[in-house]
Image (cartoon, grey):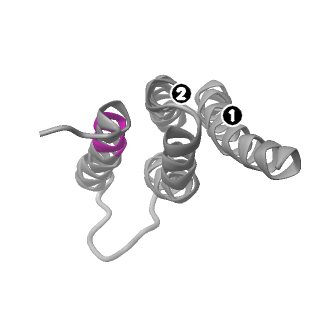
């Protein structure tokens, strides 16, 4: 069996696993900080963990379509490389944010820049092809 975009598929799975991991981190933080379900707010420490999880979901909505646009229009391999950069950025973001809000910035920048390259790279190629005819 041949898959057209195996590397991008693997990175997609990794992105979903990162999201699941952030959910597990929230579950552990609930116990540590005494935040019962269905409450979504607690101490500042818990709120940062919750926001890291929610922001990861918010970023997935932009990242995943951008990843697949880039893979199908530009390159499966390069999409996967940029996707791995995004994954590293998200991990750094979550680890940093759970410690202190300012520590989220490096991971956020890494991930958002990766997403921007994926999105604007794919759109740039499409626009170029439309103009070139």
User: According to the image, label 1 marks what residue?
Assistant: 117
Please provide percent x and percent y for residue 99. 50, 31
Please provide percent x and percent y for residue 75. 52, 31
Name the secondary structure under disc 1. helix
Name the secondary structure under disc 2. helix
Callout count: 2
Tell me if mark 1 has few (under 14), some (14-19) or many (20+) residues whose alpha carbon lies within 10 angstroms of its own: some
* Outermost front residue: 133
Left or right, 19 with respect to 96, comes to left
Nearer the observer, 129 or 109? 129
Nearer the observer, 43 or 113? 113
Q: Residue at x 70, y 39 (%)?
A: 116
Query: CB atoms at circles 1 and 2 under 8 Å apart?
Result: yes
Nearer the observer, 132 or 15? 132
Magenta residues, as a range?
10-15
Q: Residue at x 38, y 37 (%)?
A: 8
* Outermost right residue: 131
The numbered dot on residue 82 is 2
User: Above or below — where is 36 with respect to 15?
Assistant: below
Is residue 15 visible from the viewing direction of this image? yes
User: Above or below — where is 63 with respect to 98?
Assistant: below
**Mark found first going from the N terminus, 1 or 2:** 2
Left or right, 2 with respect to 132, comes to left
Tell me if mark 2 has few (under 14), some (14-19) or many (20+) residues whose alpha carbon lies within 10 angstroms of its own: many
Nearer the observer, 118 or 74? 74
Please provide percent x and percent y for residue 92. 49, 26
Q: Residue at x 50, y 32 (%)?
A: 79
């Amino acid at each position: 069996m041949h898959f057209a975009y195996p590397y991008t598929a693997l990175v997609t799975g990794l992105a979903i696993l990162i999201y699941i991991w952030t959910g597990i981190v929230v579950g552990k933080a609930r116990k540590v900080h005494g935040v019962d379900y269905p409450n979504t707010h607690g101490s500042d420490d818990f709120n940062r963990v919750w926001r890291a999880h929610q922001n990861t979901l918010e970023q997935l909505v932009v990242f995943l379509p951008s990843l697949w646009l880039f893979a199908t229009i530009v390159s499966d391999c390069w999409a996967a490389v940029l996707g791995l950069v995004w994954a590293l950025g998200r991990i750094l973001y979550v680890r940093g944010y759970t410690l202190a809000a300012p520590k989220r910035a490096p991971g956020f920048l890494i991930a958002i820049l990766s997403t921007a390259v994926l999105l604007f790279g794919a759109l740039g190629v499409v626009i170029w092809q439309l103009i070139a005819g």
